[in-house]
Amino acid sequence: MTTTTEIEYALTPSESRVRKMYIGGAWVDAVSGETIDSVNPATGEVLASVPRGRAEDVDRAVIAARRAFEGPWSRFKPVQRQQLLLDLADLFDKHWDELSLTDTLDMGKPLARTRADKARVTGMLRYYAGMAMNLDGRTIKNSQPGDLLSYTSREPVGVVGAIIPWNAPIAASIWKIGPALATGCTVVLKPSEEAPLSPLLIAELMDRAGVPEGVVNVVTGNGVEAGAALAEHLGVDKIAFTGSTQTGQSIVRASAGNIKRVSLELGGKSPLIVCADADLDATVPTVAMAAFANSGQICIAGSRLLVDRSIHDEFVERLSIFASELRVGLGVDLDTEIGPLVSKRQLDKVVGYLEAGVEQGATVRAGGNRLESGAFAAGNFVAPTVFGDADDSMSIVQEEIFGPVVVALPFDTLDEAVERANATPYGLAGGIFTQNVGTAHRLAARVRAGSVWVNTYHLLDPAVPFGGFKMSGYGREGGAEHMDEYLATKTVWVNL
Ligand code: NAD
């Protein structure tokens, strides 16, 4: 078992329990002087306190970001922004042990997984570095009489307010900061109050890499205080938001004040369709981890499992055995596959769904309970759970649980499977499991979701766009589309 003390805190000494936030290149307290505790969800221990930022702190950060946007940062050439991103990638490589441990302690994700995220996050930074040199406009042949030149340039949209959840704090921070640096925007990042510690380490790395003051600011605080103030702020040009659909709706409303741009990565209730010809040996573990990875606290968690009736019982039996054999434990234990839920609030919510599932008539095939004995007593642990005998009207089938819970539902025809897969207000992701390439492509075309994986799940890549349909949001992260979210096109006409 790896423990906290075995890994040196190279950036911020572990005894430093009172953290500051990062505004205009300086480490500061909230104007009010108030703080919020950040708690280890595996042990209940308070890890550190962070400033409780409010509107006046957001205001300071937006002013710093505006000043930077209009100041020296605007004169940085793409090649300089590229170098900054490459330097950041090297720093992230160097300090990954501390970053990954911080996420594990702060939000519970197993250390083996947070360590494995390194390639993805540094890959993102290096991808954005490449994109910084690929933001050209175009010359357009117009049809006007005379000699008129028309061309476009792509300009940074301005000050970006980035609001992120707690379930992948490092990656979510970089999915917002990376494209901003590549395009020449400036950022005010508001991490989740549940997991603010790694975003503060990221601010420290920005400082070390020489990101000019005010280009990246991190304001800690609650959603309804700091988050709402950022979404409403008239000095913010764009909000890049990742979080729940409900919060996304209030951000859209708040954006109306200055018609700021908004991109939204929201919730999901993603369907997995297992066809009769699926390779079960490969599909059972993939489906299990689609549902249970990060304790189900992933927006794309495959939580509605539609299985062809001819293989349903065998599949559910094998999935349930797999679920009950998963190693649940403290995130710092390198053998742990499933860690705790992020907070007591999240634990209560998930336990509420477990109870509702049983009350509404579903059968528990694996798990179904909170884990409370021994080392689990002080933490927020739930056993990976498989429900059977459910119907589509149940709340466990309709609503995003954000816990390690999957519901199995038999289907008889592929048309029926698609119809039921799409019978949700969400449209973030879906999975298809079949050995027939024709079936795979036909179903992929019909599932109404921003990402569809066939015989795999969860794959994300900086070059590949990711985002939602329907109430899972709009805008894309990843790929050239991601840069578009941070750029405004200017057209210039010249009478030659
Ligand atoms: P949340 O919506 O409660 O909070 C997300 C962020 O918004 C936090 O920083 C929070 O402080 C802030 N916030 C809360 N209320 C706000 C308000 N009124 N105005 C402005 N900001 C506010 O979500 P969460 O519980 O942190 O995260 C879980 C949700 O995020 C799930 O629904 C999940 O599906 C979604 N999510 C989506 C993606 C994606 O890429 N689509 C990725 C991860 C998580």
Image: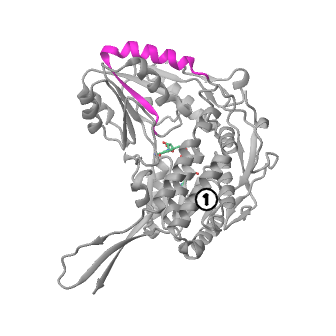
Q: Is residue 400 magenta?
A: no
Disc 1 residue type? Ala
Quadrant location of the C terminus? bottom left
At 79% from the left and 45% from the top, the residue drawn is 14
User: In the image, residue 305 lies at what x, y percent?
Assistant: 39, 26
User: 465 or 84: nearer the eye?
Assistant: 84
Q: Is residue 307 magenta?
A: yes
For the question of whether residue 364 can be seen, the reply is no
**Magenta residues, as a range?**
300-327
Ligand 1 contact, mark 1 (Cβ < 8 Å): yes
For the question of whether residue 299 can be seen, the reply is yes
Quadrant location of the N terminus? top right
User: In the image, residue 370 lies at what x, y percent?
Assistant: 61, 24
User: 112 or 129: nearer the eye?
Assistant: 129
Is residue 365 shown above or below 47?
Answer: above
Instruction: Report the magenta stretch's main SS.
Output: helix
> Badge 1: how crowded within 10 Å, few (<14), some, or many (20+)?
many
> Badge 1 is on which residue?
226
The residue at the far right in this view is: 15
User: In the image, residue 145 lies at what x, y percent?
Assistant: 17, 83
341 with respect to 14 (left or right): left
At 63% from the left and 68% from the top, the residue drawn is 214
At 66% from the left and 38% from the top, the residue drawn is 104
User: In the image, residue 120 lies at what x, y percent?
Assistant: 53, 43
Query: How many numbered circles does the render carry?
Result: 1
Is residue 89 shown above or below 238?
Answer: above
Is residue 76 shown above or below 167?
Answer: below
User: Which quadrant holds residue 73?
Assistant: bottom right
How is colour applied across the structure in the image?
one colour
